[in-house]
Image (cartoon, helix red, strand yellow):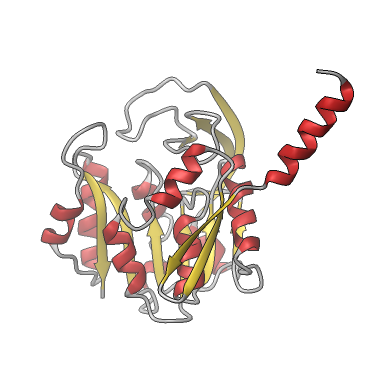
Amino acid sequence: MDNADFAKAVEAYENSNPVAAVQVGDKVLRYLTPNRICLTRVQTLATKEPDTIDWLDGMPYNTVMLDVGANVGMYSIYAGVVRRAKVYAFEPEAQNYAVLCRNLVLNDLTARSAAWCAALSDENKFDRIYISASDVGGSCHSFAEPVNAHLKPHTFPFAQGCYAATIDKLVGNGTLEVPGYIKIDVDGFEHKVIRGAAKTLQNPAVRSLLIEINSHLPEHLWIIDFLASLGFKHDPAQFQGAQRKQGFFEGVGEYVFSR
């Protein structure tokens, strides 16, 4: 390919800017789809995690939602457009974060929502995030520890520099408002996010959490007891329905806690 043909190919690629749209009632959600992973996320938005969609639909309009482990923003965009929520989204993997920001722009949400390329955990520090694959839209990355979603040692192809903060620090210094609704999906480290939010969760303004729980991890079973001590209730039948029944994520599902 000569320089002229190469320049045309680059121009065509830059102008392609593939975007997929999803109709939800009278609202249209738009997502950048640079690869098949992102396109599949759009195509399965309503079916992959139906309990997550039900939880989002139950949020009051104009609430504040914190999306921890937002990936490319599938549910951040849903909350922002369909429920008119003010969304604070955190996604530490750089490529996912870039698409997350593009999706906020595509849906005209930047005036009332914001995203950070950072992890949320139980301490404030610089470290590495171990990346499972270089594809945009990927998941199962791991901050500070090279472990998989079951917290077992795992070999990763590369790592990226990353910063982590606690929810308590960010709320305490005014970076975040106290969120009414919190979604946490960080592939195994959900307990660390909760530990880093212990003070914030005592605030009655926090009404509900949706957390991906691994029923095989003692660290995750602790989350259930801890939230119960703060007055959050859950429905075991809801979790049984949400739980994956086979495959690598067997025993993992979305738990809804409310008070």
Q: Quadrant of residue 199?
A: bottom left
Residue drawn at x 39%, y 79% is 205
Residue furthest left as drawn: 237
Q: Describe residue 245's horizontal placement relative to residue 226 as left or right.
A: left
On screen, residue 237 above or below 109: above
Residue furthest bottom as drawn: 61
On screen, residue 163 above or below 60: above
User: In which quadrant is the N terminus drawn?
Assistant: top right
Q: Inspect this view and state whether residue 41 appears.
A: yes
Residue drawn at x 50%, y 28% is 133
Q: How many marks?
A: 0
Q: Inspect this view and state whether residue 125 appears.
A: no
Nearest the viewer among 151 and 135 is 135
Where's residue 253, x and y in %? 24, 49
Where's residue 99, x and y in %? 60, 49
Residue drawn at x 19%, y 44% is 215
Where's residue 128, x and y in %? 56, 33
User: In which quadrant is the C terminus drawn?
Assistant: bottom left
Q: Describe residue 99's horizontal placement relative to residue 54 as left or right.
A: right
Q: Describe residue 206's horizontal placement relative to residue 5 as left or right.
A: left
Residue drawn at x 67%, y 47% is 17
Q: Quadrant of residue 55?
A: bottom left
Q: Quadrant of residue 40?
A: top left
Nearest the viewer among 199 and 110 is 110
Where's residue 200, x and y in %? 42, 68
Nearest the viewer among 107 and 124 is 107
